[in-house]
Amino acid sequence: MSNELRNFLAISYDELEQLNLKAKEQRQNRVASHKIQEERIKYLTDEKRIKAVTVLFSDLEGRLHMLDYDKKFLIKSWDNLTFDGSITTKSFSSRAGTT
């Protein structure tokens, strides 16, 4: 079987550790959230080997949630997502007025 169809991003544990340490340093240095956001959206947009993104977060009761998104959907809708992964009704109403 040919691997030509499988052009997915695979990074080593060391590379992942470096990315995590960079993110930790940004938080410790209080880098503005919009700058971090721009950097991460640009990384997702530019990295063609990423096909999907898993988002993890905890709710107020401490339960861990995990949502899988298609990368293109996440990039297009990142500011309108709810905790269940759907798009908010606010985003539909605000978009309806602009089209």
Image: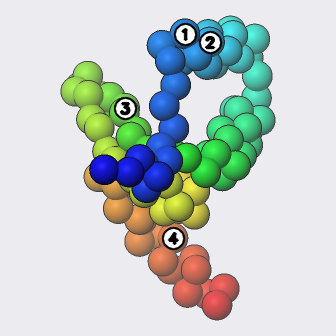
Task: Kindly check if marks 2 and 1 are in contact, taking CB atoms under 8 A apart as contact.
Answer: yes
Q: Position of residue 3 (x, y in %)?
A: 41, 47
Q: Residues within 10 Å of mark 3 (few under 14, many from 20)?
A: few
Kind of residue at badge 1: Asp
The residue sitting at 48% across, 13% down in the picture is 13
Q: Which mark is residue 18?
A: 2
Q: Position of residue 21 (x, y in %)?
A: 61, 10
Which of these two is toward me, 95 or 5? 5
Judged from this view, the residue extending furthest toward the front is 1
Q: Which circle, 3 or 4, is nearer the viewer?
A: 3
Within 10 Å of disc 2 (Cα), the crowding (few <14, some 14-19, many 20+) is few
According to the picture, the residue beneath numbered tag 1 turns out to be 14
Residue name at image x 47 percent, y 43 percent = 8
Residue to which mark 4 is pinned:
91
Identify the image quadrant of residue 94: bottom right
**Alpha-carbon span between mark 1 and mark 3:** 24 Å
Instruction: Tell us which disc is closer to us: 2 or 1.
Output: 1
Q: Residue at x 34, y 55 (%)?
A: 85
Mark 1: few, some, or many residues within 10 Å (few <14, many ≥20)?
Answer: few
State the SS at label 4. Answer: helix
